[in-house]
Structures are given as structure tokens and as C-alpha cells.
Amino acid sequence: MKKIYLSVLLFSVSLILSAKEYHVAVTGNDTNIGSAVKPFKTINRAVEFAFPGDTITVHAGVYRELVNPIRGGESNTNRIVYRATPGEKVEIKGSEIISGWEKVKNGVWKVTIPDSFFGNYNPYRDSIYGDWFYGLGRIHHTGEVFLNGKSLFEKETLEKVYHPVANPKTNDPKGSTYTWYCKNNSNSTTIWANFHEFNPNKELVEISTRKSCIYPEQLFINYITISGFYISEAATQWGAPTAEQVGMIAPHWCKGWIIENNVISNSKCSGITLGKERESGQNVWSQDKESINNDGNIHYIEVTFKVLRHNWNKEHVGSHIVRNNEIFACEQTAICGSMGAAFSTIENNHIHDIHTKRQFHGAEIGGIKFHAAIDAVIRGNRIHNCGRGIWLDWMTQGTRVSGNLFYNNDWEDLFLEVNHGPFIIDNNIFLSPAAIRTQSEGGAYLQNLIAGTVYQWPDPNRFTPYFLPHSTNIAGLTVIKGGDDRFINNIFVGKGKNANKKNSENYGLTGYTKTTYNVQFVGNVYYNGAEPLAHDSILLNSTNYNPQLKLIVNSKNLFLSFTPDSAFFNHKTKLITTKTLGRAVIPKAAFENRDGTSLTIDHDYNNRKRPIVNNAGPFSYLNRGKNKIKIW
């Protein structure tokens, strides 16, 4: 045993001693050796030298290149690290600076760019397309024009550039009058842009020229860390779940990436993608126009089985970590992934201002949009000012959404589409007008603060897969009949007794009046017009009481003001465990941790230990009277 221990120790030491650090600087030269004194000039030059255990350290400056990792690490502890030098601003951009603009009239300028400038990819000849993409009757190019780091609005005619009209659907109507239009001839592209009072030859004007910023061409480039960069302005394509998904940072069907501490912004479509590869299908529904089977549901089922034949399993794909990033100004998603996000952890990210320009639409839009997030953990994220907060679509099983903060999202904070569970939604704060929309079954909603509407409905027309526990092995397919949900120890806050009484979308749980499968409601609190169902047990029905819930935002932190009534402190609840929750009906699987161990909801939103007998909602310790709670 001592000999085995010694050999392992010697092997570990040898790895440490053999690990190398390569430096990159804008003042460097690619003929250098990559040392701190003689750094490389480009990141891609350092890529050629890096092997498992090595680090690529990039120094301050702007790097306009598509980084193509050609090797990955060997394990979670023997990876290749790409990092920005601590304390320095290092930018990787998918754009180029454009000068030589010619003034036309009324704030409109134009520039003609030869195709040779773009190399093998011209985003102004490439349009956004794909399954479930809706162009709203016009062409949208993958390219974009930026004025001092802010994207302009593409128009479908030159006339609309000369005479722009503010778009009331965007959160920046004035900004929507800064517009551009492009036209191609046989060997060049001309771009017209309305810069209004700005002279583009005296400002920073950039155009997207690359499809990504960090993306390996080859599959299974595993165990890479991307840390501390500013990443922006790539001409990303629509990330359909039936297509190769390429964001500004995109693992390519592999395992074990860590994407951390980055600032990611201004993607035409997605910021980070953890999605599938191309060989198992590339927009198969759009490409299958002659088929008698014009059903996107069937096409995605076919893709799912193809993906399984392309090593979709825990040994080869997923288990990524995406943490502590700020992601904003992306028009499709901050983070998306079809299949490839399985077994991953998405935590402590600040996601905001996603899909705010509203120039196109589609069924794949959200702050986070995952298909098949099997055994994924999404926790501690702040998600606001998005079209939709989180959208978990198809095959959400073993997934946990915990301790997230949602507010100011337009459509809803959380949408769960055609999943059979089990999945766990706990200790979240839902503050947008629409909190939860679920077309799923087998969910456990535990200890949340829900200040928006809740809406559930079945889907008897779509067969979707469910799995053996903690795996990608399909156990069967069936439709969504509805129910089999558990709402335990939540606080519901309405907008007053007469607010929003349409259909089954209400404050509280009255939308669950009719479900095929049984539902379980225990220990919930109802305030200010939120209403329970008759069979909610051990509830606190204070629907006439207004707890004065308010979000307080300052320059550094967010606080929640909340004043529970006196009855709240006599309303005691018990800790929730795997045993409490039982099993999801369809997959016959327990609500447990993703490693198969028993679950106990014994910590609150702020990660404080809950007492055995505690309060409803995401906070385990509240004071009588007005509480001001730090939530970010």
C-alpha cells in the first residue's frame, strides 16, 4: 500500500513540475517562446504549445481572434487553463474596427468592405436561421454594427436607416433609432449606418466578423478552464436544440469545462452554449420540408436518439461549471444548451438584459434555456430584465433550481416545458409579474417566495422522453397529463384581492383545480390576494394581509423588504426530505441529490442552516415587523 501511495505522489509531483505557463501580450510576437519576458502575440499561438496541466496567461489588451483549443486536459485536476492576468482587463472580441466611413446625409454614413477582409466567413452574407426561429418576415444577418460598444439595430431597408422610427417594444426606444443596413455585390459588402450626432471616424466603430470567440473545431476537447476575460461582439448563429450550438464561448460536445469570472456581452444570439454537435442533426426540421412528417416534436425525438449514438452520457459529455460570470446584451440566450448541459452546475452568474432589442423571436429564448438538463444544478443566479428568466425544456430530470433571484422578466421567471420530473425548485425568489409557467409534471416547489402568477396546463399531444435515474438511458416516452407536483412551505404574495383573475393563471395555486395526477400542497402561506386550494394542509391563509414586499436596489447590493404578519411566526413547518417528497409518477424516481443520496432542504436562500422546525419561504430567520434582507 505504501508503494502505491508513493507512486501516486511521485506522479502528481511530476505533473506539477512539468506544467508550464505560456504568456500572451499585445506587445508580443508569435515567433517568441511564450515566456513572461518574450510572450506570444496571439492566444492561438499559445494554444499550439499547451498540454494538460499547462496555463495560458493573457495580459491586458484586445485580442481579435477566434480561439480554437486543439487539446484539452485529462481530468478535472489536470486541465488546460486559459486565464486573464489577475487585475488586468483582457478582451477577446469577435469584431474588427472599421474606419473610412463616408458621410451620406442626415447622420447616415456608409463604408464598402471587400470580401477578402472577412476571409472564409462574411456575417453580412449569412442570415440567422434554424428550427423554431421566427424572423418576423425579414432577414436578420448574423453580423452586427457597434458604436462605442453598443449594438445598433439592423433594418431591412435603407429607407428605415435614413428615417428611423423608435421601437416601443425595446427597453431603449431612443437607442433603436441608431440603425444599419447592408447590401452585397459580387465581391464586397456595403454597410450604411445612422450614427446621428456621432462621427464614426472619430468614435470606436466595430462590426462582428467571427462566429465565436472561443470554440474548438474538434469534438471532445475536455477539461478546459476559461477565466477572467471580457468576451464580446461575435456573429453567433441561432442555437436551435436540433442544431450545432455555437455561442461566444462554446464547448464542442465534450466534458468538464469551467467558465468562470468572465464578462460576456453583445452576442447576436447566445453568450455561452453547452450544446450538441452537428453530426446528429443540423436544423433537421427546417431541412425536412418534403417530409410528410412536419412535426418538430418527432424530429427532436429522432435527434435525441442520434445524440445517444454520439456518446451522450456522463462519461463523455457535460459536467461543466459556469460560475460567477456577468452575461448581458445577448439576443437569444445568456446560456443555452441542448443535451450538453447535463450533469452541469450553473451558479452565481449575473444574467440581465437578454432579448431586449426584440427584432426577432423564437422558441429558444431566455436568460438560461436548456434541453435535457439531466442532473444539472442551477443555483445562486441573479436573472432580470430578460424576455424569460429560465426555460427548462424537455427531459428535465434530476435537475435542481435553487436559491436564484428573478425580477423584471417579461414573460415569466421560470418555464418548465413537457418534463416528467423529478425536478426540484427550492429557495428561489420570484418577483416578476408571472412567476412560474409549467407544462410539466413531477415537480417539487419548496420553500420559495412566489410573488407572481402560477400557471399550469397539460400537453396530451407530445410524447417526450424520461430516463433511468441519473443517466441518459431512456426508459420511455409519454405525454404530459398534468399534476404530480408538490408545493410545500412556499410563500405566495399576490397583487391584491382583485388582481388577475383570468383562466387558471392566478396568484396562489387555484390553477391546480383540475389535474390528472394527484398534487400535494402542504405548509404554504398566502398573502395579499394569493389563494390556496381547499386541500392545502397546514396552510396559513392571510390573503387579506399585505406584507409590503419590495425590492430595494442600490449601486452595490439588493435587499428585500418584507413584513410578515404575526400569524406567520406561529405557522411552523418541518424540514423537507427525499422521504417527504416520494417519487415522481412517470419515471418512478425519487427526489434526491444528483449523486443518488437522500436530499434534505436544510439550508435557506442565504445558505443559513434551517432549524428542524422552521418557517415557510426561502428565509429561515425572520424578525417580527419589517425585515430588510440582503439578497445579492
Image: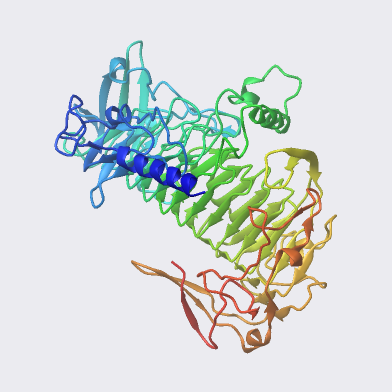
In this orientation, which residue lies closer to the viewer: 111 or 9? 9
Residue 352 in view = yes
Residue that appears at 35% across and 37% down = 233
Q: Is residue 30 left or right of residue 324?
A: left
**Residue 305 is drawn in which quadrant?**
top right
Residue 165 in view = no
With respect to residue 142, does 608 lie above or below?
below
According to the image, what is the colour scheme of the structure?
A: rainbow
Residue 581, percent across and down? 75, 64
In this orientation, which residue lies closer to the viewer: 178 or 427? 427
Q: Is residue 532 left or right of residue 415?
A: right
Q: Residue furthest top?
A: 186
Q: Is residue 533 left or right of residue 615?
A: right
**Residue 526 is drawn in which quadrant?**
bottom right
In this orientation, which residue lies closer to the viewer: 369 or 197? 369
Residue 318, percent across and down? 55, 40
Residue 412, percent across and down? 59, 55
With respect to residue 596, does 226 lie above or below?
above
Q: Quarter holding the C terminus?
A: bottom left
Residue that appears at 36% across and 69% down = 554
